[in-house]
Image: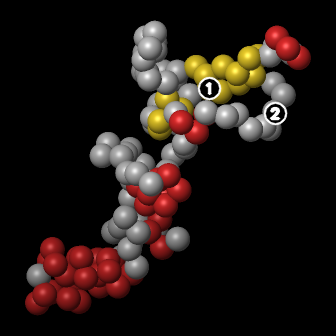
Amino acid sequence: GRVVYGLFPMVDMLNHEFQTTEVSIEGEGEEAKFVIRNGEGSGKTQKGGQVFISYGALDNSELMEGYGFVSDDNPVDCVALTEEELVEAAEDVLGAQNASGARNLVDSGAFGDAWRD
């Protein structure tokens, strides 16, 4: 379909839900209408019920920064750590007497490389 950019008053009043939401404009000219469809698993919105949109796959720090809230059940939530914070956390788990083991654990790639971004 065609991509349309525009301002839609009141849409910013809708709350966030992680379910996929399809937002589209259907029709042309005076017959055009703004349509919001619930994603899979959302169920049908009952008359008078709340309508949601998805703000995107954002972790809680991004939700707080951009929208002023966090989600208790955020499926993409994460915590950003520096390498030293990760080593400190590993030391806490392994015990301070095993500091070299904690460093080796981090250096071995046991936590993957995604945290290095």
Q: Amino acid at mark 2?
A: Val
Instruction: Tell me: residue 117, above or below residue 2.
Output: below
Identify residue for label 2.
4
Tell me the quarter of the picture where residue 24 sits.
Answer: top right
| Image spot of residue 101 (x, y percent) | 22, 84
- Say which residue appears at 13% left-offset and 87% top-offset: 96
Q: Earlier in the sequence, mark 2 or mark 1?
A: 2
Identify residue for label 1.
22
Q: Secondary structure at mark 1?
A: strand
- Say which residue appears at 56% left-offset and 28% top-offset: 21
Instruction: Tell me: residue 40, above or below residue 12.
Output: above
| Image spot of residue 95 (x, y percent) | 11, 82
Are discs 2 and 1 less than 8 Å apart at CB?
no
Q: Is residue 47 left or right of residue 30?
A: left
Q: Is residue 112 left or right of residue 100?
A: right
Q: Amino acid at mark 1?
A: Glu
Instruction: Tell me: residue 111, above or below residue 71.
Output: below
- Say which residue appears at 15% left-offset and 74% top-offset: 93
Extreme residue toward the front, this view: 9
- Say which residue appears at 50% left-offset and 52% top-offset: 67
Q: Quadrant of the N terminus?
A: top right
Nearer the viewer's eye, disc 2 or disc 1? 2
Regarding residue 104, the answer to whether it shows in the image is no
Instruction: Tell me: residue 16, above or below residue 52.
Output: below
